[in-house]
Amino acid sequence: MDTSTALAQPARPPAGGGRNLHRFANPGQFLRIATRVLPWLAVPGLVLTLAGLTWGLFFAPADWQQGDAVRIMYVHVPAAWLASAGYAALAACSLASLVWRHPLADLAAFEIGPVGAGATALCLATGSLWGKPMWGAWWVWDARLTSVLVLFFLYLGHIALVRAFDDPTRGARAGAILALVGAVDLPIIKFSVAWWNTLHQPDSITLTGAPTMYIGMLWPLFVSALGMTLGFVAIVLARTCAAVMERRIRALLTARARQEADAA
Amino acid sequence: MTRKRRRLLLVLACGAGVATATGLGLSAFSDSVAFFVSPTEIAAKAPAPGRMLRLGGLVAAGSVHKTLIDGRPAATFSVTDGKTAVTVRYVGILPDLFREGQGVVAMGTLAADGSFRAQEVLAKHDETYMPKDVADALKKSGHWNPAEGPPPPAATWDTMAVKQAGG
């Protein structure tokens, strides 16, 4: 049993001892913390998402011009925020992986990809459903829509690339480079509506001015955004835990197969 | 210099390179990245006749004339950016959000007489999200006429009390 526990540890030992981020580099430590934190993210995430969406979809006032179509915003805007925030997290993990060789960063990047791609797909789909009745078009090639579509393809590319190598370390390295190069799309998405003429409206919520959204619509939006963010983090954390355990099981099975091969 | 530090500097240098290249590329192509041109831009630099382009701006108050041509709905209206206006002729169904004072984007060509022949008209929604009660209150008090353009500063209305219609 002692040998198998030792083998279940990652191939690369965490360097630097107990300093800064590497405290969390020990997968055992990570699993202990993550399993304790997970219910505190998942339950409030689910409750707040349901509360925010119920408030937004049934109780918030309709827009004077858009009518009930404005309610698509309570899904679309949090999904758009999460698509960008998820990619920023992916880029941060990639930096930690390339520079500090953080062993958990590779696993986290591996697991953020599909969740972020899901948020981006939700953002694009709901935007399209809103665009047809409001603008008169399902899709236009303006800077905001195009840059978000590029973000979706970056996610898909990352998902495919990290899974395309026999050696997972090489896949993680290639994926990290792609994720960091793709991070240049994030400021383009954010500022596209300010830099160029777009069909997409500019930001309603800014750091400098009063929000150009009625307060009774703003609150359900914030509740739903907070809930969906907690849910996003919970899903990524649960997937990363599963990946750590999967890695351990694989190490155990490999060790047993090797032992049997030696005995034979 | 440790290996970690060297890797960090390398990643930062590559990042600066990619960011600069993208920035230069986008600023060089900023004309094609823009989704539409304003009436003032058309007046300053007239596009070649027959070339497809998108014209964007607000529908000028009192400029909309709707008729029927061969049983199909047609409309003439002017698109303005506050300084210059261009007359747009369009045969087809206008989007639901089309009204005086609304932002629109029309795709088509500039005719010899300086008017714009649109083949497609899209409504552009602005960043304002306002319940009907608030819009009515602003209109009634004379603070805002939607036909004349965007609403007053958000701070004056975004916390206004409204009757909850219950959905």
Image (spheres, coloured by chain):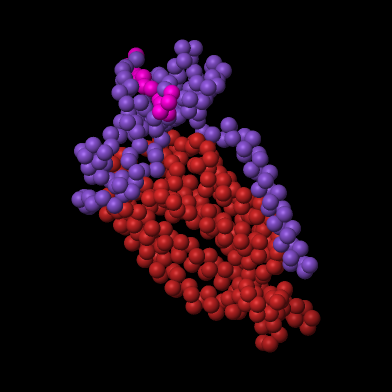
Say which of A60 and A208 sits in front: A208
Chain (purple): B
Chain A pictured colour: red
Q: Position of residue A161 (x, y in %)?
A: 67, 55
| Residue B80 among those drawn in magenta | yes
Task: Report the magenta stretch's main SS.
Answer: strand
The quarter of the image holding the N terminus of chain B is bottom right
Look at the image and give the residue range highlighted in magenta.
B70-84
Residue A86 image-quadrant placement: bottom right
Q: Is residue B84 visible?
A: yes
Say which of A61 and A125 sits in front: A61
Residue B29 image-quadrant placement: top right
| Residue A34 among those drawn in magenta | no
B126 above or below B42? below
Residue occupying the far top of the picture: B113
- The mark tally for this picture is 0
Residue at screen point 36% across, 22% down: B77
Say which of A15 and B4 sits in front: B4
Q: Position of residue B76 (x, y in %)?
A: 36, 19
Residue at screen point 25% across, 41% down: B138
Horizontal placement of A237 versus B8: left or right?
A: left
Residue at screen point 41% across, 58% down: A225
Q: Is residue A114 visible?
A: no
